Amino acid sequence: MDYNQLSKHIIEHVGGTGNIISATNCMTRLRLQLKDDSLADIASLKKLEGVMGVIGDGTLQIIVGPGKAKQLLDEFLIVAKLDKNPQVSDENWKANKEAIKGKQKQSRLKQGLRTIGEIFIPLIPAIIAAGIFNGFAGLITNLQSTGNLASSEVWNTIRLFFSLIGGSFLSYFTIFTGINAAKKFGATEALGGMLGAMSVMAQINEISGIFGMYNDESPLLSVLRSGKGGVIGVIVGVYILAKIEKRIRKLVPDVLDLIVTPLLTLAITAVLFVVIIMPVSGIFSDYLVKVLEVLVSSDIAVVNIISGFVLSALFLPMVLLGLHHGLIPIYAVQLEAMGGVSLFPVLAMAGAGQVGAAIAIYIKAKKVGNHQIKKVISGALPAGILGIGEPLIYGVTLPMGKPFITAGLGAGFGGAYVMITKVLATAWGPSGITAIPLMQPGSMLNYFIGLVVAYIGGFIVTAIFIKDSDVAEVGQEELEIHGSMGQESVSVN
């Protein structure tokens, strides 16, 4: 792929560099914030070589596939002459905010959830890498404890290195969250990172004891303790920090800004963060964990089956409504409180249901002679199996309508299996078979079986409810028109 040429074409079709506010990427997409969405020629963008799809909903998302988005962004920033890490001043932050706010037709809830997603998206490569290394470290430990692997100095050293790499990120997750939240809210990034670090400092426990909020007998039940509130508290804290910093900067003379602004900002925010935000967000996180424990750890098998089925079946509709961004902090809360993530493996079954549905449609398309949809599925199916769902969803099941529903119902069976077998992940990232290394060692096999169940479920339900005539009537024009109506990405990016 010629990323330089593609970048030039993209710039041409989005109204030029003057219409671009910012450019970022996730695992599969180039994300552009535009001043005026109406200047973007979606139809022309879709026809560009290397572009798998285009999605517009506040952020213009150009899908180029896994492993390519980062390379495209690097070249795009050079061609467009954009700063990779722009320093957001108070003035241009406000201008960008107004430009984005003016073109978005979203509820405050959706905007808030999208903001949360944009804070965590840049962290996903590190989340995946750290999770895999921790998983390998756990696998070595398990094999040594069962006697299947010698407890030698070599393996112990390898285990320690894996734990070192994985822990270097996950142990300080709140710091990275604070930095990205500050970047998103227009605060000084280093101050956001400091607030994230405060949340895990040992001094928190001593301060808690002074205020009578620390439980010496059961530290985990303390109103305030190190780590209380997790990433949820950090995001709220950094949001308030950004507000305070901007207000102080307006009042402080420029000559004193470098010293006085960060000093006063941290002093005020730290007190609010420790005394109010951490305890309140901690209470919220505790209740959230209790609800999740009812769904995930219930002794009643029927509860696990129903919750797994419903969560998997409804995940893609949640994505289309933009509600899935709010799940990312829940993953982090689960990882901290339960030592693993159960929601991610369940929701990952949604993409597997789409794969099964697509195979059923392919067989029917072959039967009725619809070569166009066969071609689309043939190109999109490998990506779907690997966990990149956009090509199948926006190219096949969503345009046809009913298969999108039948795929979700089929995915529910895989979700039910994964939930009842209590599959846990060490991190979250792409779904499909590429997520197998993200599972805890004892969960890898059951996760794979869950994928197979979802494949079969999506295939059977679609084969039963989708008629041959439904497939025969689908043409290229319909696929393009309806496929352009998708508003969100469905891979876990």
Image: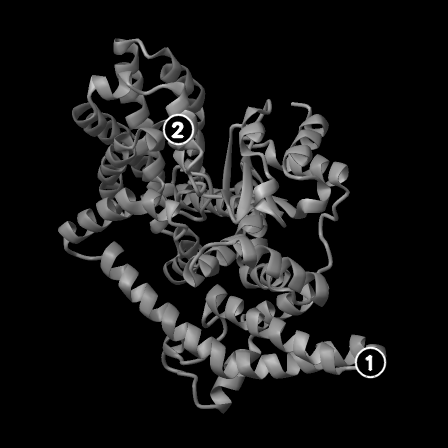
Q: Is residue 350 above or below residue 198?
A: above
Residue 240, horizontal then vertical, whole percent = 56, 74
Task: State the residue at coordinates (16%, 25%).
Answer: 464
Write down the quadrant of residue 448 in the picture: top left
**Extreme-front residue of the structure:** 38
Q: Nearer the viewer, residue 218 or 116?
A: 116
CB atoms of marks 2 and 1 within 8 Å:
no
Q: Is residue 291 above or below residue 163?
A: below
Q: Is residue 208 above or below residue 470?
A: below
Q: Nearer the viewer, residue 182 or 217?
A: 182
Label at residue 392: 2
Q: Amino acid at mark 2?
A: Leu
Q: Amino acid at mark 1?
A: Leu
Left or right: residue 282 compared with residue 448: right
Task: State the residue at coordinates (61%, 60%).
Answer: 97
Q: Quadrant of the N terminus?
A: top right
Task: State the residue at coordinates (37%, 25%).
Answer: 478
Left or right: residue 381 compared with residue 244: left
Q: How many marks?
A: 2
Residue 2, horizontal then vertical, whole percent = 69, 24
- The secondary structure type at the circle numbered 2 is helix
Instruction: Let me know if residue 423 appears in the view.
Output: no
